[in-house]
Amino acid sequence: MPANKYGARKTQVDGITFDSRAEAKYYEQLKWLKVSKQIKDFKLQPRFLLQEAFKKNGKTFRKIEYIADFEVHNLDGSIEIIDIKGVETKEFAIKRKLYERLYDTPLKVLALDKSLGFIE
């Protein structure tokens, strides 16, 4: 599959297409953590409403959503929202600020380091 402008290559695992190899690798890590009972569960691409759609002066403005990569349910009942990034875009920085303002669930941004694994 072709790379995007940031060099990420779409990757398929279990019939699911991920935006990057790093995302696919994290998915495989989450599957292992679930099977080994180190996490309760996880979800792919949870959606968070950042702004409702609205009309102004006859013009309709679409809603703004943030779609994270993963939602992880830990054994202690806590939940983490995970986003895998190679490059942090301006659009993501704005959405992250809006997310942090509206939601209490922690948002972790991880990157894949070849020698260290996933790092914040």
Image (spheres, rainbow, N blue to C red):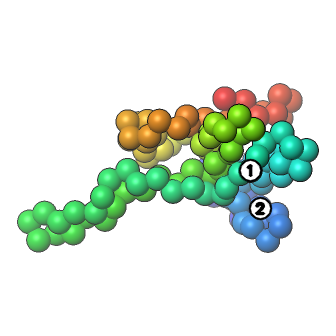
Residue 74 drawn at (x, y percent): 71, 39
Q: Amino acid at mark 2?
A: Thr
Residue where numbered disc 2 is placed: 11
Q: Amino acid at mark 1?
A: Asp
Residue at 34% x, 61% y is 63
Foreground pick, 94 / 51: 51
Q: Specify few, some or many for label 1: CA neighbours under 10 Å numbering under 14, 14-19, or 20 or more.
A: some
Residue 85 drawn at (x, y percent): 63, 42
Residue at 74% x, 50% y is 41
Q: Which mark is residue 41?
A: 1
Q: Specify few, some or many for label 2: CA neighbours under 10 Å numbering under 14, 14-19, or 20 or more.
A: some
Question: Where on the picture, by quarter, is residue 36?
Answer: top right
Question: Where on the picture, by quarter, is residue 106?
Answer: top right
Q: Is residue 94 visible?
A: no
Cα separation between marks 1 and 2? 22 Å
| Side of 59 where 10 appears, left or right | right
Residue 70 drawn at (x, y percent): 65, 50
| Side of 36 where 1 appears, left or right | left
| Side of 73 where 113 appears, left or right | right
Q: Quadrant of the N terminus?
A: bottom right
> Outermost residue, front direction?
76
Between discs 1 and 2, the one toward the N terminus: 2
Q: Is residue 11 visible?
A: yes
Residue 19 drawn at (x, y percent): 67, 58
